[in-house]
Amino acid sequence: ERAVVREYREETGFAVRVLGKYGVLKFTYTNHHITLHFYALAFAGKKPGPAPDAPALTAASECRWVPVAGLAGFAMPSLYRQAADALASGQWGMLGLLLPKD
């Protein structure tokens, strides 16, 4: 969990805390076995409300906040599509408590 908090801050500039773990997806790429862990995060020290402004970009060309249901309109690798679909369907449990579907 410390790694996801550290990486999120490094990549976005936002301090976050882990609320829980959504799920795990595993796959094999060439000779490598890869495991991706998906976490529910909240902005550290922030009460529930609107998301802060998008971070300053470094490697990305665009950034925006979208509701979980809005992920269906984005192109993404199939493994990320599996994760987005699991979130949108509520398959990963705590979704209804943490993120609006619309």
Image: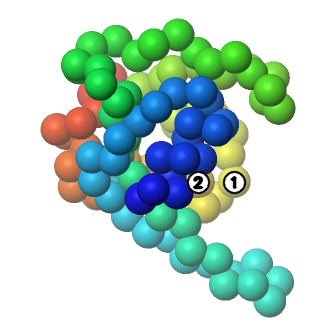
The colour mode here is rainbow
- 92 to the left or right of 73: left
Check the picture and name the quadrant holding the N terminus. bottom left
Name the residue type under label 1.
Pro
Name the residue type under label 2.
Tyr
Residue lying at 55% horizontally and 66% vertically, measured from the top left: 36
SS at circle 2: helix
State whether residue 3 is above or below residue 68: below
Residue lying at 41% horizontally and 36% vertically, measured from the top left: 16
Check the picture and name the quadrant holding the C terminus. top left
The furthest residue to the bottom? 31
Q: Would you say residue 42 is visible in this rendering?
A: yes
Q: How far from the left and from the top, in percent, is residue 82?
A: 51, 58
Residue denoted by label 1:
77
- 31 to the left or right of 82: right
Q: Nearer the viewer, residue 80 or 32?
A: 32
Residue lying at 48% horizontally and 46% vertically, measured from the top left: 5
Q: Nearer the viewer, residue 66 or 41?
A: 41
SS at circle 1: loop
Residue denoted by label 2:
80
Residue lying at 32% horizontally and 58% vertically, measured from the top left: 21
The crowding category of the residue bearing disc 2, from other C-alpha atoms within 10 Å (few below 14, some 14 to 19, many at least 20), is: few
Q: How far from the left and from the top, in percent, is residue 34?
A: 64, 77
- 15 to the left or right of 46: right
Q: How far from the left and from the top, in percent, is residue 78?
A: 64, 58
The crowding category of the residue bearing disc 1, from other C-alpha atoms within 10 Å (few below 14, some 14 to 19, many at least 20), is: few
Marks 2 and 1 close (CB-CB < 8 Å): yes
